[in-house]
Image (tube, helix red, strand yellow):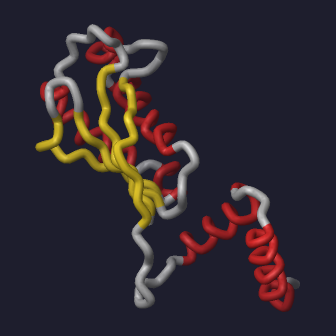
């Protein structure tokens, strides 16, 4: 599991938005985004701790089963949700189609324990990422060759 911690601030420098006024809407947005098709398929989730929402900033944690080259891109779903569902509340705070500036505070990888099982969905996503999304390396090619050896007897 990969974890990315961000601090979000208004994209407009002189914005008068007060994030604490929208705590309930942010919680709703996170719940709907996490239950969406794209986040479910990709094994991602967003969380916002209500206690970490301040007037001009708040912290967001993004978790993913696979590493993300540009994790802030996943947070654009938050802007899309808020401006689509509540355009009257957020349209005045947009700057260059962005509601937030994202500052990556930290990223970490939580290793699986030996007893933790990988789901079929996680395995399939990992194999697809290996075949199509990873940079070309000798280790990657070796892993692909090993997978092919394993799968060939099961192909009809």
Point out residue 65 in the picture as x, y percentages from the top left corner.
49, 63
Query: Relative to 69, is 40 on the left or the right?
Result: left
Query: Relative to 24, is 128 on the left or the right?
Result: right
The quadrant in which the C terminus is found is bottom right
Point out residue 117 in the picture as x, y percentages from the top left corner.
46, 84
**Residue drawn where x is 17% and y is 36% of the image:** 53
Count of numbered circles in the view: 0
Residue 56 drawn above or below residue 115: above
**Residue drawn where x is 40% and y is 24% of the image:** 84
Query: Relative to 1, is 12 on the left or the right?
Result: left
Q: In this orientation, which residue lies closer to the viewer: 150 or 140?
A: 140
Q: In this orientation, which residue lies closer to the viewer: 13 or 21?
A: 13
Point out residue 31 in the picture as x, y percentages from the top left corner.
30, 47
**Residue drawn where x is 32% and y is 49% of the image:** 61
Residue 95 location, quadrant: top left
Residue 12 location, quadrant: top left
Q: In this orientation, which residue lies closer to the viewer: 111 or 25?
A: 111
Residue 95 drawn above or below residue 125: above
The quadrant in which the N terminus is found is bottom left
Residue 93 drawn above or below residue 74: above
């Amino acid at each position: 599991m990969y974890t990315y911690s961000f601090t979000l601030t208004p994209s407009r420098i002189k914005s008068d938005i007060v994030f604490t006024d929208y705590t309930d809407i942010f919680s709703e947005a996170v719940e709907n985004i996490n239950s969406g098709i794209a986040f479910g398929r990709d094994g991602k989730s967003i969380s916002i701790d209500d206690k970490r929402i301040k007037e001009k900033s708040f912290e967001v944690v993004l978790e993913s089963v696979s590493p993300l080259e540009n994790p802030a891109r996943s947070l654009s779903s938050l802007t899309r949700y808020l401006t689509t569902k509540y355009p009257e509340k957020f349209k005045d705070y947009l700057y260059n189609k962005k509601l937030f500036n994202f500052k990556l505070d930290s990223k970490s990888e939580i290793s699986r324990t030996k007893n933790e099982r990988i789901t079929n969905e996680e395995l399939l996503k990992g194999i697809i990422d290996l075949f199509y999304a990873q940079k070309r390396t000798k280790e990657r090619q070796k892993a692909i060759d090993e997978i092919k050896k394993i799968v060939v007897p099961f192909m009809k």
